[in-house]
Amino acid sequence: MSPVLLFSFVIAYFLILLGVAWYTGRNSTNESFFIGNKSSNWMLVAFGMVGTSLSGVTFVSVPGAVAKESFAYFQVTLGYLVGYVVIAYVLLPLYYRLNLTSIYNYLNNRLGFTSYKTGAGFFILSRTLGATARLYLVVNILQDAILNSFNIPFWATTLIILVMILLYTFEGGVKTIVWTDTLQTTCMLLGLVICVIYILSNLHLGLGESLQQMHDKGYSQIFFTNPNSKLFFVKQVLAGAFITITMTGMDQEMMQKNISVKTLKDSQKNVISMSIVLMSVILIFLFLGGLLYLYAAQLNIPATGDKLFPAIALEHMPPFVSVIFIIALISALFPSADGAITALTSTFCIDIIGMQRRTDLTDAQKKKMRQRVHLSFAAIFLVFVMVFKWISNPSMIGVILKVASFTYGPLLGLFTFGILMRRSVKDKLVPFICIAAPLICFVMDKYQKELFGSFELGLELLIINGLLTFIGLWLISKPSDAARL
């Protein structure tokens, strides 16, 4: 399909987003930017968070990994459900009771100022790496599909995308993102369903017949029972639970949308309903992956992994499907990038520079400061996307989950220790514990064959990281009746 025509659809879609942003961002304040004035509709938040949770990586990498790992990723998704229950009934009541704007203020109240800064710092590192990895994957596809035809370099494509995101998040923040995420999730899911229907039709297969063919080729296995394998179902389910607890429940980007809902009860409904929808959607993505490999085998398409879906959608499907794929892909891109930049801005302003605590600044000065931080994070995103371009990996979902294992482990340890233990820590030593734990995990991961033989460490590295952090905090703590909130 003509790159010019594809690009025109991208521009039209972006103009719609700008219209939504203008309407929702009118008369916005710092409060509406950070937590949407605590007036967000829980159903909109739940639906929009499906798109944020999936991102372009899920859209491309999950189907692409089916040939290598079958439907094993669904084991992780089952763990997600457990994690969302913990978020709904353990973390959300805590956040609402303390009336938090930034969830890392809990660490300040419970463990101390240095612990608070450490937690916020690890979130900034985690979200910056994760979001830019997701952004790189989709920008790279758009570059190959459209922008190369205009001789636009990769860095310029990334800059254009970031400017587009800035234009519709600069004023409204969370208040705008709740609505744009809803639109983007709708487009992404429509694209997913249409692609599934098209491939089934062209393969002349029904649902049962397609599943049988996937089974015959070894694509549809869900549960893996070898304890030594990194795909062992116990490891995957546990890892999925803790990934959700940390990457959602202890993540400012995800939780600022939840705490923007007016009441705790509605926020809990949002989390549980979103988790059920998310499980269903990921199962469809895995099913799509099996179909893509069946379709590729029929047409002798050599592409695999992250390149499979884009190659089929853009080169071996009718123009209308190519358009739907591009719009769906952009719809998967924007929620993961716009929310990340907004959340990072919120965390840096509130937790790192303490903007809300400063009485020497007027509201106008605070808004100007927040806007400068917002622009700065967009520039940081540009730099990190270029780094990922330089060290490109065949499967970005593996990169993202591995990074999360190292960077979210300290957050898991900090929050778990604060919630479960009646002990106070030596606050100034906390950063050293939170740095040491991921470094130990890095060594364990790098030399796991020498250390563990045939036993493979996978996503459970996050749990080990959190446990090491927890143990370290216990070693630098002492009993205190007043420690628990």
Image (cartoon, helix red, strand yellow):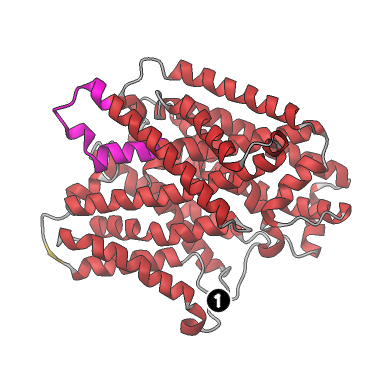
Image coordinates of residue 167 in percent, x first then y, are 48, 25
- Quadrant the N terminus occupies: top right
Q: Is residue 344 covered in magenta?
A: yes
| Residue 262 seen by the camera | no
Q: Which image quarter: residue 218?
A: bottom right
Q: In this view, does 69 lie above or below 375?
A: below
The secondary structure making up most of the magenta span is helix
Image coordinates of residue 307 in percent, x first then y, are 70, 51
Q: How many marks?
A: 1
Residues 101 and 235: in front is: 101
Which residue corresponds to the image point at 38% horizontal and 51% vertical from the top-left? 125
Task: Identify residue type, mark 1.
Answer: Pro
Neighbourhood count class around disc 1 (C-alpha, 10 Å): few under 14, some 14–19, many 20 upward: few
Q: Give the range drawn in magenta.
A: 342-366
Residues 155 and 328: in front is: 155
| Residue 224 seen by the camera | yes
Which residue corresponds to the image point at 49% horizontal and 64% vertical from the top-left? 459
Q: Which image quarter: residue 25?
A: top left
Q: Which image quarter: residue 68?
A: bottom right
Q: Is residue 71 covered in magenta?
A: no
Which residue corresponds to the image point at 87% horizontal and 52% vertical from the top-left? 299
Q: Name the residue under label 1.
A: 227
